[in-house]
Image (spheres, rainbow, N blue to C red):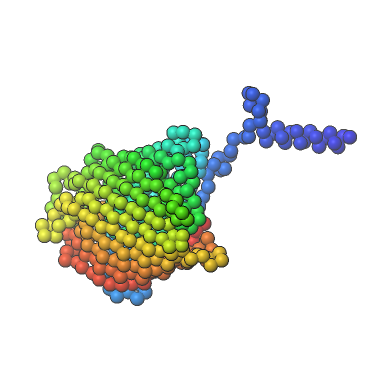
Amino acid sequence: MKKCLVALLVLVAGYSHAQTPDSAGKAVSPAKKWFETFAVRGYVQARYNRLLETNDDLSCEQCDRSWGKNGGILLRRVRIIFFGQLHERVYFYIQPDFANTPTGSSTGNFGQLRDAYFDIGLDKKSQYRVRLGQSKIPYGFENMQSSQIRLPLDRNDALNSAFSNERDLAAILYWAPTPVRERFSRLVRTGLKGSGDYGVLALGVFNGQTANRSDLNNQRHIVARVTYPLVVGRHIIEPSLQAYAGDYVVGKDQQSAGVKARRDLSYPDQRLAATFVLYPQPFGVQAEFNAGRGPEFNPRTDSIETRNLHGGYVLLNYRLQVQQQQFYPFLRAHYYEGGKKHERDARSYSVREAELGVEWQPFSSFELVAMYTLSARRFEDFQLQDNKQRGGLLRLQAQLNF
């Protein structure tokens, strides 16, 4: 009898500790410990670009700095992501990258912030939410698609030229109904190469100087986007429209000595883009085009001027599942005519490029991509004029997911 009484007391004490009654007498679960409110994940990419290379003067600063002369094995990205739901209406996301190489440096693998933001839900289901901090600007499907998921090794020049690292300091209002938010998540989770949940509607303001750079003119850029993943029979398609506008200041640290520029160094920075995505079930199509105007180096006048820009891409892909393994063969063609405002002297570009490759996922924690690139690039600034390069190269990437 005594043993039964002791066991009963231990059981009651354990239940009382696990569930504390509130003022109405209802059992309330204890608050989560701090280490239970967030999770950690990440990925590492290792690349080699020199196989079958035909021109070691062919390079792409924004793409991959191990292209071309003296390029070797590169850690392209080393990302560790901290994220969590601190409250039903408060979510946070912090992502540093430990594979950064400062411009002009031969020393790499510096840590630099990519994302640091939090979402505040304006309703209980966070269908309306405000994102504050440094995050991706909702402009372009491939820009928002994680490099952990994207098929080609680098983003296309046409839309990626809008933002260095696709990010800026911003305040953005997102809206999407709960079923659509779940669809966005499923498109990523099930291997359909989605872009993630950036809302059906997005409206925001951002500094306009791109990631990790201070504002230089006390004026905000504005951005707006509308998208919707439609279920059509057994397929899912997602059309989108997006635009942004503001004034970009070409910093003195971005200019060559002797280049001519406006006195206030400020240039209109405006773009409009259209997107169409057919998710691979098993055949997929992804296409984007944008046009606008912004700062660009003019080699005829040795000056940075406001000039028109345009460009886009078409990506064809296929999803093949063999037991637990997945194969994604793909073909992408893209072009761009315009400047890259965040590069030296708002470097002028004319790009024609085709890429044929395949991604192999033998299991979820490892991926291997082989991609052959044929490229014709003109990229010119005050120091590098009359520079036109053509060539081909085989590129390899191994990726670890954790």
Q: Position of residue 314 (x, y in %)?
A: 33, 61
* Total count of labels: 0
* Residue at point 70%, 32% (across, down): 16
Q: Position of residue 324 (x, y in %)?
A: 55, 64
Vertical order, 153 against 127 (above or below)? below
Observer-nearest residue: 309 or 14?
Answer: 309
Vertical order, 142 against 90 (above or below)? below
* Residue at point 50%, 53% (across, down): 189
- Residue lying farthest to the left in this orientation: 301
* Residue at point 66%, 25% (across, down): 25
- Residue lying farthest to the right in this orientation: 1
The quadrant where residue 323 appears: bottom right
Observer-nearest residue: 213 or 367?
Answer: 367
Q: Position of residue 310 (x, y in %)?
A: 23, 56
Q: Is residue 43 visible?
A: no
**Quadrant (top left/top right/bottom left/bottom right) for the N terminus:** top right
* Residue at point 43%, 47% (across, down): 197
Left or right, 268 with respect to 200, comes to left
Observer-nearest residue: 250 or 333?
Answer: 333
Q: Is residue 246 visible?
A: yes
Observer-nearest residue: 263 or 21?
Answer: 21
Q: Position of residue 9 (x, y in %)?
A: 79, 33
Left or right, 99 with respect to 19, comes to left
Vertical order, 267 against 330 (above or below)? above
- Residue lying farthest to the top in this orientation: 23
